[in-house]
Amino acid sequence: MTSSTDKFAGPGPDQVYYEHLRNGNFSLPKCKDCGELHFFPRVVCPHCGSFELEWVGLSGNAEVYSTTVIRRKPERGGNYNVCLVTLEEGPRLMSRVEGIDAEDVKIGAKVSVQINNESDEPFVVFTPTKEA
Amino acid sequence: MSHELRGSSAIVGVGLAGCGEAHGRMPLDILSEATHNALDDAGLKLSDIDGLFTGSSYHFMPTLSTAEYLGIKPKFSDGSMVGGSSFVAHTLNAAMAIKNGLCEVALICYGSNQRTAGGKLATMSEQQIYEAPYKPRYPISSYALAAARHMHQYGTTRENLADVAVAARQWAKLNPEAFARGDLSREDVMNARMVSDPLSLLDCCLVTDGGGAVIMVSSERAKDFPNKPVHVLGTGTAHWHRQITQMPDLATTAAVDSGKRAFEMAGVTKNDVDVVELYDAFTINTIMFLEDLGFCAKGEGGAFVSNGNIAPGGILPVNTNGGGLSCVHPGMYGIFILIEAVRQLRGGCGDRQVKDAEIALVHGNGGVLSSQVTTILGTEATL
């Protein structure tokens, strides 16, 4: 009984995720059995069903998987981007690309993570990756 | 050996109410009027119903509120909630309940006043906390992301999307009960106000009021009703995700599995299908579902829906009532595709009747391409 509850000790994955972001770290759970990472953070690996997970830091490199421009009147703030990005490490999440017009976000574009701390809960956004 | 549920139950009554605008009515008023019409159609009384299957965006415990309103005391109830596909899924649960003697007369029903109540989509959905910071517009942004990905992977075009809307409108023009019956061209759809790229206002389903009801009994009992029974040959369900971020491949839905399961239970193939009724919340749905159900190869849906192929006179009749795009769409649409399929298989659909229709495929969608449910219906001759 003790051994099965130990791995669940401490705060849940949602709290750990945001705690990492508040400390400037973008991290996700990685499965100790199959090696896959997942998003959104859970207590179980959705790829293989293992409960043996560890938190790992991410490179912050990603690629735009799909993108849309949500049309909004200028007086209400204008158009904005919503996209899905696939992280270099595998997981996909919803985000937005900042620093370019919403219309210019293209599928396949390389992007890099930024942690946005403007609201109570931090969240990640992406900016176009500068060519090396 | 065929599945024990194949053809074990049949639809003997269908009813619509308040489709379009139903001023001054609450959702359960509309649902109850549709139930009245379905009972009339079947020659049954309210007191005959002993099984209740319903879903709602208005009532947290929809079977309780609906039975209370109708004044019925069902022996078996099921309020399984998989969005707009719920009512198609209910055919499987009703068939199981009837087969096992848990109820004899099942009512599947829905009603909504979405349009006259102000057009807002009523929802009891929880906030998706990892999506909320980006302010996606629900549900359209999720479908737009899928459409953009399908276009990227397979070269699907906005013209292809527009052709789905045009075909739906051409069917609606043959249906006196359809809400939107004016002329519509590919250019009209392409030039409509963009909402969430690549989807314009006319790539989106209507916002109407409306209710629908379906009565199911055992196939043995179904012989004694005023209308030709329509048998439930097979139903398959599948879901792979809830939020769009979790969809494994945005260009392929779980209809791949639900369709396969339904065809297996029904013991038929796509070549046996005479008429197709799909949940077209957005134009991209029709393209993806036709691919995933096997009516064309993956990636060829765009070409398949073009050139009038799914319009009246085309190679495959799809969404013969005009669909959610042009006929009716009150929040959740699943019940209406069941009803149109039953009407087609009975015959008597007037100008839009598919000649000699014996087998219909009904495909429901729920959430954001999340829940996929396929039902195959057939006439007496297909048993």
Image: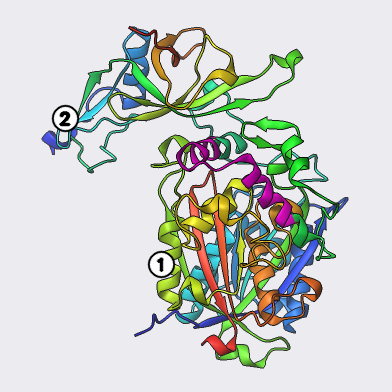
Against A43, residue B13 (above or below) is below
> Which kind of residue does numbered mark 1 sit on?
Arg
The residue shown at (59%, 90%) is: B221
Q: Magenta span covers which residues? A: B145-168
Query: Disc 1 marks which residue?
Result: B261
Measured as percent of width and height from the top left, residue B198 is found at 62, 34
For the residues labelled 1 and 2, the Cα–Cα distance comes to 41 Å
Q: Give the main secondary structure of the magenta stretch.
A: helix
Is B165 magenta? The answer is yes
Q: Chain of mark 1?
A: B
> Does label 2 lie on the same chain as label 1?
no
User: In front: A25, or B167?
Assistant: B167
Which label lies toward us, 1 or 2?
Answer: 1
Q: Chain of mark 2?
A: A
Quadrant location of the N terminus of chain B in the rendered image = bottom left
Is A17 magenta? The answer is no
Measured as percent of width and height from the top left, residue A118 is found at 51, 7
Q: Is the residue marked by circle 2 packed among few (<14), some (14-19), or many (20+) residues within 10 Å?
A: few
Against A81, residue B379 (above or below) is below
Residue lying furthest front: B307
Answer yes or no: is residue B81 visible: no
Query: Disc 2 marks which residue?
Result: A6
Task: Look at the image and name its color scheme.
Answer: rainbow
Q: Is residue B314 left or right of residue A131?
A: right
